[in-house]
Amino acid sequence: MHKDSDILSQLLSSTPIGTAFPIIQAPTITTIDVFPTTAPHLGLLLAIKERDLTKLTPSSSVAAVQIQGKSLEDWVQFHITQSLGGILSWCGSLNRPPDVIIKSGVGVEVKQLGLELQDLQFNSSLPKRNITSFDPMLSLECRACELQPWKKEMFYAIGHVAKKQIHTLCIIDGALIANTYKVYQKMLSAIKTALANTDNTHLVSLKTNELGKFRSRDSLGNLIIRNRSMNQLEHPLRLYSDYLPINFKLLKGIFLCSKVRYDAIPESQRQHIETCGKRYDLELPSSTEPNLLVKSIAICQTESDYLKMPLPLKTPEIYKPVRYEQLELF
């Protein structure tokens, strides 16, 4: 492991949650000669024509070898770095979101589904509009993945996959589908209170950070019952089906974003995203305020739009791919 990773591990193990992290001296880099001037936005994945999850070919600056992808998450990470020239400051952990953080860019949660509009599974985590380095639900390693405290917009990469082929790629702004953390916590607190106050002669309530925990009152009293939330979210394209101009079955890809966040994307990147399909200006129901509509942008990519795209992706200079060896340094 790199010596700076050891320093970071020592810092994390000895620093209480909430303590401001000191700036760590970055390692001396000698093998990197190309950096993108702007972090690529996740919406640019719509421009990737190669959607076979098993065929990931590094950029021309590296020996021509095939990387065998295993999942949509591999595909997303590979093309952010190799096709769009981005750098990942976080590559995910087994049980906690996010799956990806683009250095100086957005946070990404990847959801791989079948060909139907299934609900998004979150298990015990919650959907997010933003993520921050102060979020106690993130791992300490994730919170320290960049040298300065950070707050990032959250986006969801949803791939409808069959036989290792991405049939429809959906890039969705978390601000359009998730409520605030405070609202979700109120909901969970109400459930936890109700469970704790359950009048049951067969159970003893135990202290827990989960929704509920009980011990049985039977002869042995050796059964522990734990209550945890298993959360899921209605698929965004089913939720907004009455507002979208194109039926899901006709889509090869879609980038759905609030206009506020869309306008904040660098103009050159917006122009590139809009070459991937047709732009529609929409008003969608707010995820936080009843009876409020949010101005939003949908870039809808049909089969004909997809077939017109070049292969491989011809990236502008600011997305020039970095050398593959960089990945081990971040």
Image (spheres, rainbow, N blue to C red):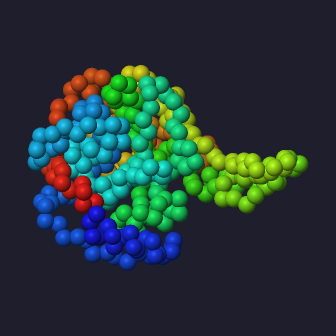
- Note whether 233 is above or below 39 in the view shown: above
Q: Nearer the viewer, residue 76 or 286?
A: 76
Q: Is residue 159 visible?
A: yes
In the visual, does 95 lie left or right of 146?
A: right
Residue sticking out furthest to the front? 220
In the visual, does 159 lie left or right of 128?
A: left
Answer with the quarter of the image where residue 306 lies: top left
- Note whether 180 is above or below 64 in the view shown: below
Picture residue at 70% right of the left edge, 55% below the top: 189
Picture residue at 51% right of the left edge, 74% below the top: 16
Answer with the quarter of the image where residue 34 lies: bottom left
- Note whether 78 is above or below 241 in the view shown: below
In the visual, does 104 lie left or right of 314?
A: right
- How far across and how far down the image is residue 79, in percent? 26, 43
Picture residue at 28% right of the left edge, 60% below the top: 330
- How far across and how far down the image is residue 309, in percent? 21, 30
From the image, which quarter does the N terminus lie in?
bottom left
Answer with the quarter of the image where residue 249 lies: top left
In the visual, does 105 lie left or right of 142?
A: left
Q: Is residue 256 visible?
A: no
- How far across and how far down the image is residue 279, in percent? 34, 35
Picture residue at 32% right of the left edge, 42% below the top: 74
- How far across and how far down the image is residue 94, in percent? 44, 49
Q: Nearer the viewer, residue 165 or 236?
A: 165
- Note whether 98 is above or below 9 in the view shown: above
Q: Disc count in the image?
A: 0
